[in-house]
């Protein structure tokens, strides 16, 4: 599991892992200057929060271990960014890809962590030898976790480590070789948006806030969320968390104000819209909730997995018609996303529409290349054919 996003769904009554600074646009700066409504009286800020300047610190022993390996590889003619990557590869041989989020030194010592933890460790090593890095989100199949009436979905983040700049004829070469550090290479993944260093740090604090929320430690969750807000005040998922925390504390008015503030920042945020709709429905404002539901379907987010996630949520809420629309929208964008076919298959099967279910499975087979997957689809088709012949 990687970067967590807190989402509300109707059935659960509640709540969703990887450098350079990016200047805010004028409009963002003006919006950020507006006072975000936060009811501080509801929360007690915790003092035991890891400060951002310690996130990437490594112990002296770990520094020396890495530098010895890194310098040895350089002496053998390995380029610096490759040397760092090769060192991490040796670490990952025994690395447990556990879903928790750790700071860099913890990830090294424990030899485990999610994609955020790996990115934290990569950042620490790159800083130690002055290599430039950046981060980018990766669009993957959504991973869900349900805990303490919370539904959390995770996105994936990876790090790129760049070859040092070299001057050629008094000009810096802008063609930069780089290596991607990631432990989750899947053919259907594709790179999403770039993440600057402040946004990345905010992701760490968001994850820690979600962990605290699972434990129902509202004050700790709020403290982590405020740390994230300090680094990325325009981050939609940070605003999302703040709204959820206020709603958890019974302040529906401030929660709604925060959702509306977030929708000024990004009117097309599906996660924010989803949570706001739940708030409206829980407070009997179905007409306005329906307006926002219809608006969601008109959005043009090119990431098919965003729509797949929404389809899952609609299906979980028993909204089959809406789920079908969203599964279809997923496949319009990316016909290779096989879980969308299986979602449609489940819907058709529950409706007794066996011919449509069979057609959907055959379409899934056209996009399936894994032997076990193909066998599973064929088995389902066999069962459907057997039922039809009875």
Image (cartoon, helix red, strand yellow):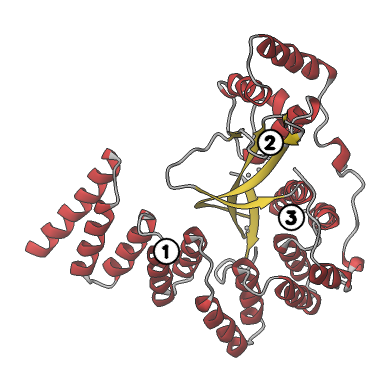
Dot 3 and dot 1 residues touching (CB under 8 Å): no
Find numbered disc 3 in the image and state the secondary structure of the residue it sits on: loop
Quadrant the N terminus occupies: top right
According to the picture, the residue beneath numbered tag 3 turns out to be 216
Q: How far apart are marks 3 and 2 (CA)?
A: 51 Å
Percent across and percent down for residue 301 are 54, 67
Between 208 and 42, the one nearer to me in the picture:
208
Q: In which quarter of the image is residue 296?
A: bottom right
Closer to viewer: mark 3 or mark 2: 2
Closer to viewer: mark 2 or mark 1: 2
Residue drawn at x 52%, y 71% is 300
Residue 365 left/right relative to 338: left
Q: Residue 226 carries which label?
A: none
Find numbered disc 2 in the image and state the secondary structure of the residue it sits on: loop
Of the two numbered discs 3 and 2 on the same chain, state the one appearing first in sequence.
Answer: 2
According to the picture, the residue beneath numbered tag 2 turns out to be 173
Q: How crowded is mark 3: few (under 14 residues within 10 Å), some or many (20 or more)?
A: some
Q: Distance between the residues labelled 2 and 1?
A: 37 Å
Residue drawn at x 83%, y 22% is 59
């Amino acid at each position: 599991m990687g970067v967590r996003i807190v989402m509300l769904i109707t059935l659960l009554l509640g709540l969703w892992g990887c450098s350079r600074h990016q200047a805010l646009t004028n409009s963002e700066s003006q919006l950020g200057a507006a006072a975000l409504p936060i009811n501080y009286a509801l929360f007690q800020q915790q003092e035991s929060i890891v400060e951002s300047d310690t996130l990437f610190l490594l112990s002296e022993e770990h520094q020396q271990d890495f530098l010895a390996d890194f310098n040895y590889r350089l002496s053998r003619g390995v380029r610096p960014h490759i040397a760092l990557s090769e060192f991490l590869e040796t670490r990952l041989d025994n690395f447990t890809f556990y879903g928790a989020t750790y700071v860099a030194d913890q990830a090294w010592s424990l030899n485990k962590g999610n994609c955020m933890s790996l990115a934290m460790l990569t950042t620490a090593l790159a800083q130690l030898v002055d290599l430039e890095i950046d981060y980018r989100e990766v669009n993957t199949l959504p991973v869900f976790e349900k805990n303490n009436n919370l539904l959390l979905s995770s996105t994936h983040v990876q790090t790129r480590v760049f070859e040092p700049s070299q001057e050629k004829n008094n000009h810096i070469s802008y063609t930069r070789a780089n290596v991607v550090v990631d432990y989750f290479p899947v053919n259907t993944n594709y790179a999403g948006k770039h993440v600057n260093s402040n946004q990345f740090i905010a992701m760490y604090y968001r994850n820690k806030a979600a962990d605290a929320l699972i434990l129902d430690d509202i004050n700790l969750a709020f403290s982590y969320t405020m740390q994230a807000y300090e680094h990325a005040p325009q981050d939609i998922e940070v605003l999302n968390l703040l709204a959820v925390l206020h709603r958890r504390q019974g302040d529906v008015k401030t929660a709604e104000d925060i959702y509306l503030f977030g929708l000024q920042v990004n009117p097309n945020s599906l996660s924010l819209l989803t949570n706001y709709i739940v708030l409206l429905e829980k407070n009997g404002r179905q007409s306005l909730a329906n307006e926002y539901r219809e608006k969601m379907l008109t959005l043009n987010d090119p990431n098919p997995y965003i729509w797949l996630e929404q389809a899952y949520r609609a299906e979980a809420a028993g909204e089959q018609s809406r789920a079908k629309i969203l599964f279809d929208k997923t496949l319009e964008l990316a016909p290779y996303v096989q879980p969308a076919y299986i979602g449609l298959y489940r819907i058709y099967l529950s409706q007794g529409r066996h011919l449509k279910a069979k057609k959907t499975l055959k379409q899934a087979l056209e996009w399936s290349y894994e032997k076990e997957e193909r066998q599973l689809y064929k088995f389902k088709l066999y069962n459907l054919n057997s039922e039809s012949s009875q």
